[in-house]
Image: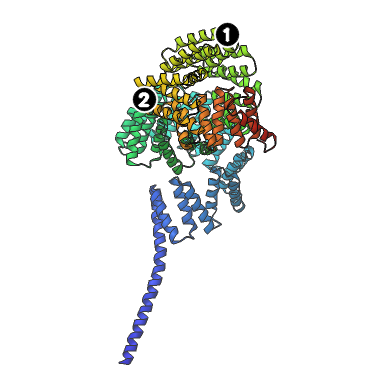
């Protein structure tokens, strides 16, 4: 019995050992089989063009065997097909790590380096492959691309010719040689190479299109047309190629033939393919035919009811034709189904910017930048949203990124140039302005900035040349003449200044800056009657524009003040407020009259009586507040400004005065900033409002933002001692003592007694005593 038990135990032990062994050996075989199954499935998906599914299977395979360099290579190829370049690069790098002799993976890495302008890294890969395989055609083509980026065109051509001599039937080599020959200006060689490429691959579209472009530029339009028709004959899917011919007809100004060809593509397309319809819509957009474009897009949307891309295209169509309500409805429908849709968020962000909803715009552009970090326009519009929030430093970062990603993005460069000029950063401003003018020599805004920058650089002749070019390019635009007038006035050429300002006023009766400077010049020369007649003439031209009319009435009041005629001045200031209560100047002027006459109680009683009859009389709240401010009763002044804002919450003059009141009394500086920003939004061109906002920024320690506002303010009011003083103090705090000294000295040269003059002298003494150069 005992022996039997031992025997059974032995059998059980042996069986258990065999079972474990079977399980172990079976497990190993299963792992290899699973890897093979995943690879087989992945390759099947590749054959079917289902690359997303192929990616999943290749990833499963490399998880089972991280040393399979071929699987990593194929995974990288699949990633490329689904446009995931970063993941593709990582897969090729892992293939090389698993097997350093995998030259195909090295080649792919080199090609990706070349696309990313990492020229030195691309060269290393090309040289590594050619050291192992000197006749590797793809590596020679990679090296040729490297040489192009290194601006060694001749060497690049020779490298391609070597590749062609090794394999004369390589389509890509001939196509690349054609392009390089074109780059060098050798049209004959380019034509030969394109024709050779076409002989090798008669169905390839690119050589037809590029060669047709050469023929068109040479004026051989018929030859280009025949070539494109030959492309049609060779095409397997005629409807896919017809839009190329149609676009050619557009470019050669044959719109009827172009439309007919686009329509033929629509007719020949398979039932579910909306591409030709969208191409037709694009043609109508370029022809500025909104209705026809919308009709084509709606037909596409009927075929593909759930395609968000078409809906976003429709929204963009509405947007481009300034039908913003329709654009918003269309984009909201897309976002209701997919709140993360990138293109829909981009368009919604632009719509929000237009409505000044900067918080929503910023949220949208943040999403787009996260999803598409290399989208230059997304960074640009995000910067606009940040500027709307007053976040200038953050905006600058996105603007710099935008031009880094797309050096030809002129709009971003213009904002950067303006910002640098306002900061007094001449070097960086010059870099941006020069780059813009290299891209667009006749850009009016860039030339205007160039003029301003040359004045900063003390190049008066250069500034004059830029402004003269502006008026030459845009003779019917008043702004160029205003800039010329200011320059002539600054250089004591009064007659020329008057002529320039007069020209600006003649062109644009609403050009208040020009009229103000012209009236100021005439008044200073003792020609106040002429100044008043000029104002009367301008009032007739702007009688239907209450804002401009009110500004001219205020300007007339200042002329009478210069003539010591307070009664007429007062009447005009009151008339200005009656015409349009939303400008600041007449309120301040009236308060100065009351203060100069020391009729405080009488003035307050008069306005209180008005308010008793009409509690919504904004002018009276503002006048009483200004008087109390002058009397040093900031608390009472504050209460009147707040009452005005209760009547009209975005009343710019009251918001400005309340911001100044709170800031000067050292109260809630964040609240002061809020009101200063409301004032700036309502009165964007008022120098006093710019000064208030700048001073609040100064008190908050945001010196670059303060400098920007003060510089803008001084463009409108260059001889205001207080604003020059504020600018000097901001420069001083921003560690720019040289610029601070210049501004403070100018302030004291204009007046010795302005509020802050003592602090200005004290700061000048500190600067002269020493400190870092700014």
The reply, left or right, for residue 158 in relation to residue 649 is right
Residue at 34% in and 83% down: 11
The reply, left or right, for residue 396 in relation to residue 272 is right
| Mark 1 nearby-residue class (10 Å; few <14, some 14–19, many ≥20) | few
Residue at 55% in and 53% down: 103
Residue 279 x, y percent position in the rendering: 39, 31
Which one is nearer the viewer's eye here, 311 or 148?
A: 311
Which one is nearer the viewer's eye here, 480 or 698?
A: 698
Disc nearer the start of the sequence (1/2): 2
Secondary structure category for the residue under label 2: helix
Quick one: quadrant of the C terminus?
top right
The reply, left or right, for residue 269 in relation to residue 394 is left
| Mark 2 nearby-residue class (10 Å; few <14, some 14–19, many ≥20) | some
Which one is nearer the viewer's eye here, 194 or 651?
A: 651
Q: Where residue 290 is drawn, which disc sits there? A: 2
The residue mark sitting in front, 1 or 2, is 1
Secondary structure category for the residue under label 1: loop
Q: Where residue 527 is drawn, which disc sits there? A: 1
Residue 657 x, y percent position in the rendering: 47, 27
**Can residue 581 be seen in the rendering of this structure?**
no
Q: Where residue 552 is drawn, which disc sits there? A: none
Quick one: quadrant of the N terminus?
bottom left
């Amino acid at each position: 019995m005992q022996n039997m038990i031992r025997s059974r135990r032995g059998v059980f032990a042996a069986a258990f050992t065999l079972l474990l062994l079977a399980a172990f050996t079976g497990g190993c075989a299963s792992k290899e089989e699973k890897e093979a199954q995943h690879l087989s499935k992945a390759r099947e998906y590749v054959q079917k063009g289902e690359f997303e599914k192929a990616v999943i299977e290749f990833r499963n395979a490399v998880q089972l065997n991280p040393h399979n360099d071929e699987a990593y290579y194929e995974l990288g190829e699949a990633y490329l097909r689904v446009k995931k370049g970063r993941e593709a690069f990582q897969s090729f790098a892992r293939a090389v790590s698993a097997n350093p002799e995998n030259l195909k993976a090295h080649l792919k890495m080199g090609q990706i380096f070349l696309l990313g302008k990492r020229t030195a890294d691309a060269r290393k890969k090309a040289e590594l492959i050619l050291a192992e395989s000197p006749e590797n055609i793809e590596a020679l083509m990679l090296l040729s691309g490297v040489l192009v980026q290194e601006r060694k065109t001749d060497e690049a051509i020779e490298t391609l010719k070597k590749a062609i001599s090794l394999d004369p039937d390589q389509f890509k080599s001939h196509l690349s040689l054609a392009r390089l020959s074109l780059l060098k200006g050798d049209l004959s060689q380019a034509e030969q190479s394109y024709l050779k490429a076409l002989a090798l691959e008669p169905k390839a579209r690119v050589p037809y299109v590029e060669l047709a472009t050469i023929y068109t530029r040479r004026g051989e339009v018929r030859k280009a047309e025949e070539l494109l028709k030959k492309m049609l004959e060779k095409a397997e899917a005629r409807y896919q190629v017809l839009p190329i011919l149609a676009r050619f007809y557009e470019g050669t100004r044959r719109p009827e033939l172009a439309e007919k060809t686009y329509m033929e593509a629509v007719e020949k397309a398979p039932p579910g393919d909306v591409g030709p319809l969208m191409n037709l819509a694009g043609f109508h957009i370029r022809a500025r035919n909104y209705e026809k474009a919308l009709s084509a897009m709606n037909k596409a949307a009927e075929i593909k009811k759930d395609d968000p891309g078409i809906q976003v295209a429709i929204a963009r169509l509405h947007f481009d034709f300034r039908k913003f309500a329709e654009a918003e409805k269309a984009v909201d429908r897309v976002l209701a189904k997919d709140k993360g849709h990138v293109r829909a968020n981009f368009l919604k962000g632009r719509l929000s910017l237009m409505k000044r909803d900067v918080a929503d715009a910023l949220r949208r552009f943040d999403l787009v930048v996260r999803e598409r970090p290399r989208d230059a326009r997304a960074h640009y519009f995000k910067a606009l949203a940040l500027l709307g929030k007053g976040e200038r430093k953050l905006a600058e970062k996105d603007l710099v990124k935008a031009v880094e990603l797309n050096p030809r993005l002129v709009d971003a460069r213009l904002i950067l140039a303006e910002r640098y000029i306002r900061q007094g950063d001449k070097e960086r401003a010059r870099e941006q302005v020069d780059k813009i003018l290299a891209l667009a020599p006749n850009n009016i805004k860039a030339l205007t900035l160039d003029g301003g920058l040359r004045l900063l650089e003390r190049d008066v002749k250069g500034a004059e040349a830029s402004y003269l070019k502006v008026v030459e390019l845009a003779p019917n635009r008043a702004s160029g003449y205003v800039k010329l007038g200011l320059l002539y006035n600054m250089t004591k050429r009064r007659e020329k200044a008057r002529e320039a300002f007069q020209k600006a006023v003649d062109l644009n009766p609403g050009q208040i800056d020009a009229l103000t400077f012209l009236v100021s010049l005439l008044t200073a020369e003792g020609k106040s009657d002429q100044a008043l007649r000029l104002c009367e003439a301008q009032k007739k031209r702007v009688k239907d524009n209450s804002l401009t009319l009110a500004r001219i009435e205020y300007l007339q009041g200042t002329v009478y003040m210069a003539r010591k005629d307070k009664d007429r001045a007062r009447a005009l200031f009151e008339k200005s407020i009656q015409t349009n209560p939303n400008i600041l100047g007449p309120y301040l002027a009236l308060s100065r009259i009351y203060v100069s006459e020391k009729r405080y109680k009488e003035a307050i009683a008069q306005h209180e009586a008005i308010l008793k009859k009409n509690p919504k009389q904004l002018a009276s709240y503002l006048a009483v507040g200004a008087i109390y401010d002058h009397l040093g009763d900031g608390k009472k002044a504050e209460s009147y400004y707040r009452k005005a804002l209760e009547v009209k919450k975005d009343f710019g003059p009251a918001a400005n005065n309340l911001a100044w009141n709170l800031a000067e009394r050292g109260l809630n500086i964040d609240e002061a900033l809020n009101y200063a920003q409301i004032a700036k939004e309502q009165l964007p061109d008022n120098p006093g409002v710019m000064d208030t906002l700048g001073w609040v920024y100064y008190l908050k320690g945001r010196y670059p933002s303060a400098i920007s506002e003060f510089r803008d303010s001084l463009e409108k009011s260059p001889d205001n001692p207080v604003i020059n003083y504020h600018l000097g103090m901001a420069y001083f705090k921003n560690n720019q003592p040289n610029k601070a000294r210049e501004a403070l000295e100018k302030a004291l040269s204009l007046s010795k007694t302005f509020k802050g003059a003592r602090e200005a002298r004290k700061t000048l003494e500190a600067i002269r005593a020493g400190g870092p150069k700014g």
